[in-house]
Image (tube, grey):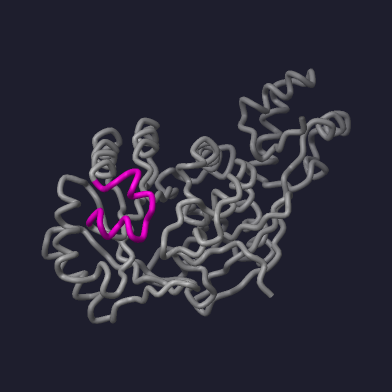
């Protein structure tokens, strides 16, 4: 079976070299070519020698993600539609921060699945259904492909922050996501700090506990979006399986084991979850959880009747939450004009 080099860590490359009767140092060289220099072809690994390259070509490949389309927002955000080797498509979003408001950095929002099985009522990805999990190589390939794009644009900055907030539920592709996180963090790979990596989940309680036990110094973001089971179940089917009581226990376990706070994403929907009683219910649910809340005015999605509250009501809700002792902010919006914001990714080819 041909293996994808982008899916292999150093231990697996060492095993590969052993099988090929090659010295161990070759594995370290290969790892650097694949995960640091981001080669897309074995021919680029210039110091491995023709003999080894020929042997490798019989056993491995490097998965390629082709940019089919890119859209640039008025705010500079770029959305990439990427073709996978099997003909499926995914999207990832590059957010460039250059102003005084934020430190200079490039953040990439990446996908973990083709489609999504969660079916959240406000999310375009869920309306497309679920096809399959992405491989480790396909997850990492988004970072490597966009880095290559940036190098050609002479941007001067590689991807320094990665958020697993694109298409799919990361914790339902757990093994591949965690392996990709470790590879991004590797000092001989991308060397991206764990603190600059965020994993988002709609609330898979057992997997949140499993992630806690890894004790990774990353950021966990939970898509909450409603303060009661009655409301949350209307827009997030996962709440039937893991209601707020189970989610809260999993979050408290995460706090206890990792000593890190959790970010809760809360999409404000007009006349649904944005009223004064909802701010009180939200504060009540969050009691006993070390956390920060990101308020996200809902983004428009085809086929959805949800609309965002008025700007006045958004800031009233912010004030209400703050007065109840909750750490809260309004997330900076990027890419809404190209359907690249939260809940808008579809991974479809549209002319």
Residue 81 relative to residue 303: left or right: right
Give me the residue at 27% from left, 58% from top: 293
Q: For the stretch drawn in magenta, what is the main secondary structure?
A: helix
Q: Can residue 175 be found in the magenta stretch?
A: no
Q: Which residues are magenta?
A: 228-244
Q: Quadrant of the N terminus?
A: top right
Q: Quadrant of the C terminus?
A: bottom right
Residue 235 placement (x, y as % from top left): 36, 60
Give me the residue at 36% from left, 30% from top: 213
Q: Can residue 231 be found in the magenta stretch?
A: yes
Q: Is residue 20 above or below residue 307?
A: above
Give me the residue at 22% from left, 47% from top: 290
Give me the residue at 24% from left, 44% from top: 248
Q: Is residue 36 above or below residue 152?
A: above
> Which sits in the foreground, 251 or 132?
132
Residue 288 placement (x, y as % from top left): 16, 45
> Which sits in the foreground, 53 or 154?
53
Residue 143 placement (x, y as % from top left): 59, 52
Residue 348 relative to residue 345: left or right: right
Residue 234 occupies which quadrant of the picture? bottom left
> Which sits in the foreground, 183 or 206?
206
Residue 13 placement (x, y as % from top left): 68, 28
Residue 176 relative to residue 51: left or right: left
């Amino acid at each position: 079976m041909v293996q994808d080099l982008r899916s292999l860590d150093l231990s697996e490359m060492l095993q590969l070299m052993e099988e090929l009767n090659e010295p161990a140092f070759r594995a370290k060289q290969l790892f650097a070519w694949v995960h640091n220099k981001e080669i897309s072809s074995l021919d680029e690994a210039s110091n491995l020698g023709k003999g080894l390259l020929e042997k490798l070509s019989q056993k491995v490949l490097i998965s390629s993600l082709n940019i089919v389309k890119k859209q640039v927002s008025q705010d500079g955000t770029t959305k990439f539609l990427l073709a996978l080797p099997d003909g499926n498509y995914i999207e990832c979003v590059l957010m460039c921060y250059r102003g005084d408001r934020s430190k200079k950095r490039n953040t990439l929002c990446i996908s973990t699945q083709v489609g999504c099985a969660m079916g959240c009522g406000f999310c375009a990805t869920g309306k497309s259904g679920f096809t399959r999990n992405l491989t480790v190589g396909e997850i990492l390939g988004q970072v490597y492909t966009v880095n290559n794009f940036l190098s050609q644009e002479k941007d001067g900055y590689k991807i320094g922050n990665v958020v697993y907030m694109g298409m799919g539920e990361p914790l339902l592709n757990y093994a591949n996501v965690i392996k990709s996180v470790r590879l991004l963090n590797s000092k001989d790979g991308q060397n991206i700090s764990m603190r600059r990596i965020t994993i988002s989940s709609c609330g898979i309680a057992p997997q949140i506990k499993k992630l806690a036990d890894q004790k990774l110094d990353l950021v966990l973001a939970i898509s909450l979006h409603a303060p009661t089971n009655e409301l949350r179940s209307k827009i997030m089917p996962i709440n039937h399986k893991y209601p707020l009581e189970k989610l809260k226990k999993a979050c408290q376990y995460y706090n206890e084991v990792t000593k890190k706070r959790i970010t809760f994403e809360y999409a404000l929907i007009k006349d649904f979850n944005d009223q004064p009683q909802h701010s009180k219910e939200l504060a009540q649910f969050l009691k006993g959880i070390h956390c920060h809340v990101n308020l996200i005015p809902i983004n428009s999605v085809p086929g959805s009747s949800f609309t965002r509250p008025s700007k006045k009501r958004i800031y009233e809700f912010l004030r209400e939450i703050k007065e109840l002792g909750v750490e809260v902010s309004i997330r900076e919006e990027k890419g809404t004009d190209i359907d690249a914001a939260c809940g808008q990714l579809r991974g479809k080819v549209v002319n």
